[in-house]
Amino acid sequence: MPLQLRSRFISLTIRHAFAASRTASSLTSSTAAKTYYAQLYKKDGNLEISLSRLGSKLDASCVIEVLNRCSPDHSLLGLRFFVWAGLRSDYRHSPYIYTKAGKVLKMKDNPQVIHDVLEAYKREGCAVGVRTFRVVLNLCKETKLADESFWVLRKMVDFGCHPDTVMYNVVLRLFCEVGRLDEVGELVEEMDTVGICPDMITYSLMIKAYCDAERIEDACGLFKVMKERGCRPNVAAYSQLLDGVCKYGSLKRALELLEGMENEDGDCKPNVMTYTSVIQAFCERGRSVEALTILDRMVSFGCPPNRVTAIVFNKRFCEEGLLEQAYKVTERIIDVGTASARECFSSLVVSLLQAGHVEEAEKEFRRMLSAGLKPDGLACSVMVKQMCLEDRELDSFDLLQDIDKIELPSTIDSDICCGLLGRLCQKNHVEEAAELAKLMIEKGVQPKGLLTDGTMERLKKFGYSDLVTQLTSLGKPENCGSAV
């Protein structure tokens, strides 16, 4: 058999074997689901014990199929099956399955089913341990049931079980997410009372929640308590507090926190995101020139700035009209940072345009092209769009050609190309419209909106029916391509 035919034969054999294996696995899961579902309705003693005796295969597909069969009329049985499955040694629910189960059983609409299942355990004298409550609490967490999680936590004592830090953290997380901070504080005090130590997750949850609620003093006080209790803050706790202080607190305190991170060992050292967050806070409060000292501090600490740092500075300096500072800081970040000249100058072009410095932006854009620097997609798109807004269709077209000459990858937004083509046709710039249509065909740009706005008809009148045919074919679903 020729080598090429042999390779095709082997490939087809493998594909068929894989498809057969997948089909067999699906059938196995479906068969197991039918078996488990049927067992749920048999009245032969303890439900969980009877399910364990079946010995059928259990996987995520099987679990979801059983729940689908139980919902919505028999959610209690479905939830008991779900909890039982989560206690099996050969299977574990993933976060996705917890979320999916909550949706299938419609627990947001029927949270009472959680109460019902625990009451059923109590009534039937079922053996319920800490692991059972862990499954139920995880389900509450993934389905965002704060009140039910608190009720479950309180119900543990009725079964002779006691929650640990992880279980308290589930409830605390849900309370923090809905802003019930007073109850959060009470729960943490309760943890101390019963001898359960809050951990880093506990403190991080609370610090973030306090910061989100603009309770910066409470967040800072908790941070101090955490350190006093010997719980060493990690970079997440520092960053959460620093973000909150930068948004709602004093910049002096932000600098103190930054210094604290710089004096820490290991993973708590500030990174580029940390410094950029402080720089942004100074810029947003109109102290952009002072933010340059943070850049110096950042570099001296051995943390090079990146593209985001450049964007933060450029945006603010351009808004304040400090264009010379914008150019200087861009050059500085290119020299000492990790961002390329293309990235930094592209962000400068965008910032100049957004701040209304159109002439300066165009000048910088053309300087990049002449220097062989390739502006990124956003810079190209906003530059061309700005020219169109100024009724400079021919200039826009010339710029597109200049961009194409330096062989930029797909960078121009397809909507902008289509808009420019439409405007060229409206203004009877026949040759330019035809050249742009050819460029769009070459790059595979889909003619969004052009099929209905009259542009295609104008091209036909100009004698370019062949281009219309090719553009129309690009608009079909099987063809893709979105930019020049």
Image (cartoon, helix red, strand yellow):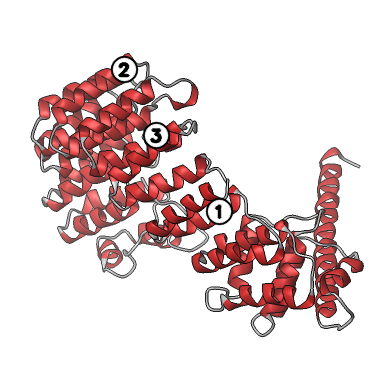
Question: Is residue 438 something that shows in the picture?
Answer: no
In this view of the protein, which residue sits in the foreground, 231 or 8?
Answer: 231
Q: Residue at x 35, y 21 (%)?
A: 304
Tell me if label 2 and label 1 are in contact, CB under 8 Å. no
Q: Which residue is mark 1?
A: 168
State how far apart marks 2 and 3 are (Cα).
Answer: 20 Å
Q: Position of residue 313 (x, y in %)?
A: 21, 32
- Secondary structure under tag 3 reads helix
Rendering coords of residue 434 (x, y %): 28, 52
Residue displayed at 55% across by 64% down: 149
Q: Can you identify the residue that label 3 sits on? A: 238
The residue tagged 2 is: 299
Residue 82, x across and y down, in percent: 72, 67
**Three-letter code for the amino acid on which mark 3 is drawn:** Tyr
Q: Is residue 262 above or below residue 364?
A: above
Any part of residue 248 in sight: yes
Three-letter code, disc 2: Val
Q: Give me the residue at 19% from left, 57% from top.
A: 423
Pointers 3 and 1 in contact (CB under 8 A)? no
Pointer 2 local density, CA inside 10 Å: few below 14, some 14–19, many at least 20: some
Q: Quadrant of residue 252?
A: top left
Q: Nearer the viewer, mark 2 or mark 1?
A: 1
Q: Earlier in the sequence, mark 2 or mark 3?
A: 3
